[in-house]
Amino acid sequence: MSKIISVVGLGYVGLSNAILLAQHNKVFAIDNNVERVKQINNRKSPIHDREIIDYLKTKNQLYLAALS
C-alpha cells in the first residue's frame, strides 16, 4: 500500500530518505535552499552518492518544493 510522505530538508540524510521512500510511496520533499531544489529538479544530485545520482537520472519521482 502506497503512502504519502513528506520529507523536510534535502541534505544528505533527507535526500537519501526521500529517494528510498519514493521507491514505493509518493514523497513530497521540501527544502529552503532554492538552488538545491532546482538542482534536483534538473536531475542533478547536490551530494556525491552513486545511488542518488542513478535514481535522479532514471526515475526522479520526487515532488519538490522550495521555501524561502
Image: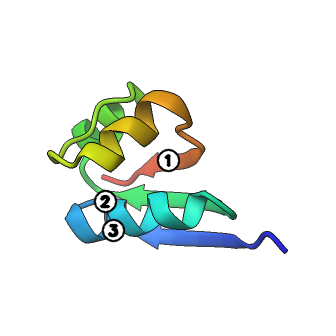
- Residue shown at the point (34%, 59%) measured from the top left: 15
Mark closest to the chain's N terminus, 1 or 3: 3
Mark closest to the chain's N terminus, 2 or 1: 2
In the rendered structure, the answer to whether residue 55 lies left or right of residue 47 reads: right
Residue marked by disc 3: 14
- Residue shown at the point (51%, 30%) measured from the top left: 58
Q: Label 3 sits on what residue type?
A: Gly
- Residue shown at the point (24%, 50%) measured from the top left: 33
Mark 2 vs 1: CB contact within 8 A? yes
Residue marked by disc 2: 10
- Image x and y of residue 40, in percent: 36, 37
Mark 2 vs 3: CB contact within 8 A? yes
In the rendered structure, the answer to whether residue 60 lies left or right of residue 31 reads: right
Residue marked by disc 1: 64
Whether 18 is drawn above or below 33: the answer is below
- Image x and y of residue 2, in percent: 79, 69
Q: Label 1 sits on what residue type?
A: Leu
* Residue in front for this viewpoint, 58 or 27: 58
In the rendered structure, the answer to whether residue 58 lies left or right of residue 5 reads: left
* Circle 2: element type: loop
**Alpha carbons under labels 2 and 3: distance apart:** 5 Å
